[in-house]
Image (spheres, rainbow, N blue to C red):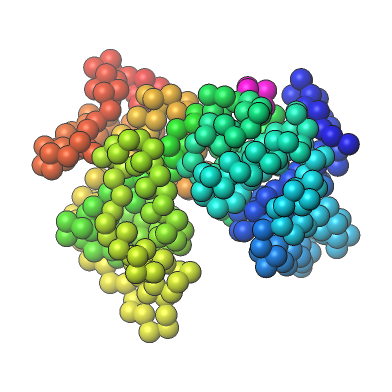
Amino acid sequence: MTFTLPHDVSTLMAMPAAELPIGVIGAGAMGAGIAQVAAVHGHPVVLADAQAAALERARAGHVAAMTRDVEKGRRTREDADAVLARFTYVDGVTADALSHFAPCTMVIEAIVEQLAAKQTLFRALDAIVSPQAILASNTSSLSIAAIGSACTRAERVVGVHFFNPAPIMPLVEIISAISTAPEFATAALTLAHRWGKTTVRVTDTPGFLVNRVARPYYGESLRMLEEGMADVATIDWALTTIGGFRMGPFTLMDMIGNDVNFAVSCSVYEGTFHDPRYRPSVTQQRLVEAGWLGRKSGRGYYRYDAEAPAPAPVMKATLGQQIVDRVLAMLVNEAVTAHELGIASRPHIETAMTTGVNYPRGLLAWGDLIGAGEILHRLERLQTRYGDPRYRPSPRIAEIIAGQGTLLNG
């Protein structure tokens, strides 16, 4: 059986999940999590990986997740067994292995963040699945248009970017390339809605929405560290205690992995033709080169061994407020720029940053609370002080002030 995409999306919404097989290639944390989401919602799922060990870890993780659900009373043992029975685990990504994906409604790629590897995989899938099947990439920063260029039918290639851990995090970015046909993007969005996800539509730009708008949270914090304004613990303390962010930037980078975070920063920087706003940090580069990747390596900005000293922030309210003010000005400016460039609508920008990275409020609304004039003043002061175009304000901020509008609705 091969899948044919209904012309009417409401038809797709009404079809039983059991008739809509989902494929996932890449059984790492993201791929295994995405596969679990689809299986829990009733879809037959084919999960493949080039490494047998990764596939076995994914299988064990699925069993453990269902066992926890039973123990916590979230599902019956019968239901858990039914979810596990929906998985087909495929060892390898050879032509024979990929033939298991022929019946799939949508195949989601979650392999290594290397364009050539993704293009090779999509080229192979393009010849195997139904012409009407959706080919999706979970890439966090690579061009969907470039990935789709490997296919004879690039119009069915779409970005479907989940956040880690996929079974828990509510946001999914639906990314349309210039080559993506609207019906395929809408079908992917519809499936994500069936899985209980909150979706935002995003254009195919470097870093997409969340990773692009969030860059200053890391980049400006690193800049303040490098210039000696404050140490790691103090910046984390200021942004959590005074700013209200759930996790400080250095704690968050250590959790994500400095190798991963640095790679995204480099990708956005290169993808925007070296826009100074997204300039990566030499400090973070040195940590990656030293193997200090964060929690997974036992050391990053902090140490994670038993003898590690407790963080000792300098808890001065004035200093803390200066840190928060500077980071917020950059974040709000980035959100305004994202709308100005047509990356996403204002409501989707707000939704993305509150559900994708758990910011305490939407950045445009936050900017209105501070005042557009104050945001502009902070940016101009930084630009004057450093002479660095990374601090250039979005022209839209001045236009909104002149028109007496608001960042959220202006």
Measured along the vertical axis of the image, is residue 182 above or below residue 115? Answer: above
Q: Is 171 left or right of 284, judged from the image as shown?
A: right
On whether residue 183 falls in the magenta region, the answer is yes
Question: Within the image, what quadrant is residue 303 found in?
Answer: bottom left
Q: Which residues are magenta?
A: 181-185
Q: Residue 201: where, in percent of width, then height?
A: 55, 30
On whether residue 121 falls in the magenta region, the answer is no
Give the residue at x 39% y 30%. 338
Most extreme residue toward the top, as rendered? Answer: 403
Q: How many circles with numbers are drawn on the protein?
A: 0
Give the residue at x 22% y 54%. 224
Most extreme residue toward the bottom, as rendered? Answer: 307
Q: Is 95 left or right of 316, judged from the image as shown?
A: right
Q: Nearer the viewer, residue 259 or 102?
A: 102
Q: Residue 274: where, in percent of width, then height?
A: 30, 39
Q: Residue 145: where, in percent of width, then height?
A: 53, 31
Q: Is 178 left or right of 386, judged from the image as shown?
A: right
Quarter of the image that includes the N terminus: top right
Q: Is residue 247 visible?
A: no
Give the residue at x 66% y 27%. 153
Measured along the vertical axis of the image, is residue 267 above or below residue 312? Answer: above
Q: Residue 59: where, in percent of width, then height?
A: 74, 63
Give the residue at x 76% y 38%. 128
Question: Within the image, what quadrant is residue 382 found in?
Answer: top left
Dominant SS in magenta: helix
Q: Nearer the viewer, residue 165 or 245?
A: 165
Q: Nearer the viewer, residue 42 or 266?
A: 266
